[in-house]
């Protein structure tokens, strides 16, 4: 079994302290996708958010089409499309089109979302996100596999719908994003791949899959994290960690991603010391250094993958303030001196 290696996350942010024009950012995205394709990476992952000051990618499947036109073999993933904020039939159509124009290279990662502002903007109750997700997953399956279908749910009702064209892949691979037990169990019930789940979450998946009559073996799970490779060990660490700290402080503070376990309130900019501690800890977890250092760090994470699970190396290398020559060199070293030897080891296992 080939060890897959994917790069992410392409969100096309333009930070307040480092403004960039989005025309240039998207041009760079296309060029970077070509680099990844040429270097032999298996997947490039794009990410979605809405109404955020930095212009975060709001329409992933449009971006997928642009990347597909610029590449020939790399798979193009969404990590993640915030499914409950969309219309299911439009997602089914757009995903089918993206799969067609890419030649069957779409990997559809989906998540429920969590930002109140996004739900409020689209007039959707955040409390309905789980039930909308369940119905939308049903509808996607029906739309892609049935000539005509009807559906009667709490949120969506359709009568004798025919969706064309159909995707090339039957089915399009779907990844469930998140690590909350309810999310992992939802993926298990539907035998979906896992995006962002941790090894310790696997028992939720396995139990739910078996209860639903599925064999959980052979499911893909992302493994990895922030990565930066350079010829000089200390230079690599000194380069990525300040960038990652700024990214996490800036983004997590604005999103309110983490909640205080005691107060139950989002940890935002009004609690700078606590927020800084979280951002610093996440940045220190980056895998950075010479190729042999990063290779060993990834090897250790692969070893934590549960038996029977197929790991997909998911490596975040895109930080918008990073000079592009450094980013290109990082990708080259990662492909040739980190991933290639790891693949040889993986494929030679007894």
Image (cartoon, helix red, strand yellow):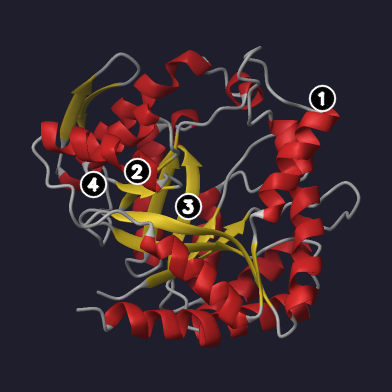
Query: Residue sitting at 40 percent across and 64 percent down?
Result: 302
Mark 3 vs 2: CB contact within 8 A? no
Q: Secondary structure at mark 2?
A: helix
Return the residue at label 3: 78
Mark 3 vs 4: CB contact within 8 A? no
- In three-dimensional space, the C-alpha distance between marks 3 and 4, rounded to whole angstroms, equals 18 Å
Work out which quarter of the rendered image holds the N terminus and state it: bottom left
Query: Residue sitting at 20 percent across and 56 percent down?
Result: 170
Whether residue 96 sits left or right of residue 231 in the image: it is: left
Q: Earlier in the sequence, mark 1 or mark 3?
A: 3
Whether residue 322 sits left or right of residue 99 in the image: it is: right
**Badge 3, how many Cα within 10 Å: few under 14, some, many 20+?**
many
**What number is the disc on residue 271?**
1
Query: Residue sitting at 81 percent across and 49 percent down?
Result: 246
Q: Earlier in the sequence, mark 4 or mark 1?
A: 4
Question: Which of the pair 42/169 is nearer the observer?
Answer: 42
């Amino acid at each position: 079994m080939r060890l897959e290696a994917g790069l992410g996350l392409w969100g096309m942010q333009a930070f307040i302290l480092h403004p960039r024009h989005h025309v240039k950012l998207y041009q760079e995205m296309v060029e970077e996708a070509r680099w990844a394709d040429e270097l032999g990476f298996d997947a490039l992952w794009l990410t979605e958010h809405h109404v955020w000051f930095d212009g975060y990618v709001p329409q992933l499947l449009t971006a997928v089409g642009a990347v597909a036109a610029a590449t020939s073999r790399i798979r193009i993933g969404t990590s993640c499309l915030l499914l409950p904020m969309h219309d299911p039939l439009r997602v089914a159509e757009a995903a089918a089109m993206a799969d067609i124009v890419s030649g069957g290279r779409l990997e559809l990662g989906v998540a429920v979302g969590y930002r109140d502002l996004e739900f409020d903007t689209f007039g959707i109750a955040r409390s309905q996100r789980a039930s909308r997700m369940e119905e939308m997953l049903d509808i996607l399956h029906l739309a892609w596999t049935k000539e005509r279908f009807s559906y009667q749910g709490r949120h969506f009702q359709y009568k004798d719908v025919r969706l064309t064209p159909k995707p090339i892949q039957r089915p399009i691979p779907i990844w469930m994003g998140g690590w909350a037990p309810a999310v992992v169990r939802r993926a298990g019930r539907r035998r979906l791949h896992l995006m962002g789940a941790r090894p310790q979450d696997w028992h939720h998946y396995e139990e739910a899959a078996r209860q639903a009559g599925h064999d959980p073996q052979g499911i893909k799970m992302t493994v990895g994290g922030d990565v930066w490779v350079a010829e000089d060990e200390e230079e690599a660490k000194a380069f990525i960690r300040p960038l990652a700290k700024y990214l996490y402080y800036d983004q997590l503070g604005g999103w309110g991603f983490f909640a205080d376990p005691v107060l139950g309130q989002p940890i935002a900019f009004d609690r700078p010391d606590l927020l800084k501690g979280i951002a610093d800890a996440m940045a220190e977890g980056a895998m950075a250094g010479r190729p042999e250092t990063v290779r060993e760090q990834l090897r250790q994470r692969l070893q934590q993958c549960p038996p029977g699970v197929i790991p997909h190396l998911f490596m975040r290398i895109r930080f918008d303030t990073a000079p592009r020559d450094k980013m290109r060199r990082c990708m080259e070293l990662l492909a040739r001196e980190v991933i290639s030897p790891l693949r040889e080891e993986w494929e030679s296992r007894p």
